[in-house]
Amino acid sequence: MSTFRAPKGTYDLIPPASATHLAVRETLAALPRLAGYGYVETPAFEDTAVFVRGVGESTDVVSKEMYTFDDKGGRSITLRPEGTAPVVRAALEAGLQQGQLPVKLWYSGSYYRYERMQRGRYRHFAQIGAEALGSADPALDAELIWLADSGFRAFGLQRTRLLLNTLGDATCRPLYREALVAYLALLDLDDDTRRRAEINPLRVLDDKRPEVREQLVDAPLITDHLCEACQQHHAAVRTFLDDLGVAYAEDPRLVRGLDYYTRTTFEFVHDGLGSQSALGGGGRYDGLSESLGGPPLPSVGWALGVDRTVLALEAEGIEVAGSARCEVYVVPLGDAARRRSVALAAELRSTGVATDIAYGDRGLKGAMRGADRSGARFTLVLGDRDLEAGTAQCKEMASGDQSSLQLATVVEELEEKLRRAVS
Ligand code: AMP
């Protein structure tokens, strides 16, 4: 063991578990790509102001959880705690809003929050995100929700639930906010919560403590304060979701930890994850572009947590197919055989057969142990005498069957055997 360990709140992804993470990313990203979303990649850090203005100063993410530092040039830099503000910043910088709308983008990456570590909550974590910028069409909200829902369903997850809400807009939310502030002012709240109620009263609705929850039973709900336009938008989103066969539960108390949301908000939760139950979420953020100095650009998007999706799969005992495992393991015995084996492995890999070789002088027994561990379907033993005879000895690992193959045609023969083994 080395003197060093991964920093607190982080963990390493190591084979074979890392294959599950890769598969999760690939599955969650596959559907947005089929729906016209293009790949976007932004730096791991941004000017701190992108998050302060974009995500909002009153949020926990900005006020408590950011990794912020001055770089050597004296600029305030922040490791990205989320993906939406950077993606909107990048789209505006490239002028994408001047082209065809909506601009549809997807991304995959690492995010950083200084949080208290617990299962499902880390300081370095991975998200897949999708954003559609420049359209207020409720069909787009439904498209994004369907994409996420279908992604989770592609794994066969059964215990995910979709919670849906609307947060109103610049017309109706201020009135709702006033009603909520007036209600909260009469409650028995500690100083911290009272401060929070002043800065961002909607967040109090998210409080998990029983003594606060009890007092919120009769709190005014946004759904009773929506303006006509927001009501229509929400009704349209629900109709599209019904048409798409997406099941959801309305949760008028669903608020999210980022300030930029307007209208549609949603969260996917999983019932096997304990307190960190949110697998992912998102919603509309019609005002974000303007907060970043851009033009009005009504937009909607989501971010799904890769780490928690992996935990949800574990909780349901679902194994996702890992990346290409070894199919053929080549065991060379002797120097000439080694030269031939290196070339043969390259040839097999070039035709798409996952191939590994026994490296080092481990002898036949040691090399066969390596073959077992590799999980290969076939092992090809190549001795110097085989080489002279132009043959190789093939062992099917599951059955133990052995056969002698001609070296001249060994690639085609192995391909044929692998095809038969699959069918
Ligand atoms: P948010 O940007 O907070 O809405 O997060 C979207 C999703 O990212 C959440 O539902 C989680 O699945 C995941 N996520 C957020 N924060 C963390 C964290 N600290 N550790 C692991 N996953 C996280």
Image (cartoon, rainbow, N blue to C red):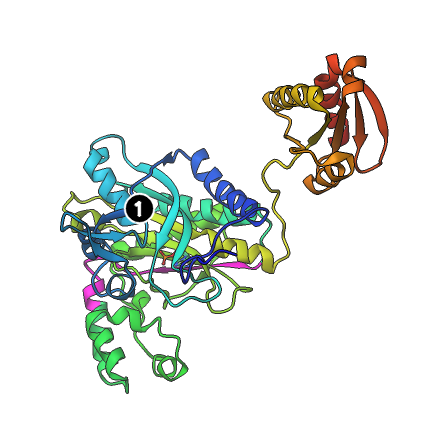
Question: What is the three-letter code of the residue carrying label 1?
Answer: Ala
Image quadrant where residue 417 sits: top right
Residue at the extreme bottom: 188
Q: The C terminus lies in which quarter of the figure?
A: top right
Q: Helix, strand, or loop for circle 1? A: loop
Label 1 near ligand 1 (CB < 8 Å): no
Front residue of this view, candidates 33 and 187: 33
Q: Is 370 above or below relative to 149?
A: above
Is 67 positioned to the left or the right of 150 in the image?
A: left
Q: Position of residue 212 (x, y in %)?
A: 35, 81
Instruction: Judge whether residue 327 is colored magenta.
Output: no
Q: Position of residue 141 (x, y in %)?
A: 37, 47
Front residue of this view, candidates 136 and 40: 40
Is 385 positioned to the left or the right of 327 in the image?
A: right
Residue where numbered disc 1 is placed? 44
Residue 423 in view, yes or no = no
Q: Is 187 above or below relative to 22?
A: below
Instruction: Judge whether residue 166 is colored magenta.
Output: yes
Residue 49 in view, yes or no = yes
Front residue of this view, candidates 170 and 236: 170
Q: Determine crowd level at label 1: few under 14, some 14-19, many 20+ residues with C-alpha closer than 10 A.
A: some
Query: Which residue: 57% across, 50% down?
Result: 17
Q: Is 174 above or below relative to 235?
A: below
Is 324 positioned to the left or the right of 237 in the image?
A: right
Residues rendered magenta in the picture: 159-175
Query: Which residue: 80% across, 32% down?
Result: 396
Q: Position of residue 300 (x, y in %)?
A: 32, 47
Image quadrant where residue 294 sits: top left
Q: Position of residue 296 (x, y in %)?
A: 18, 45
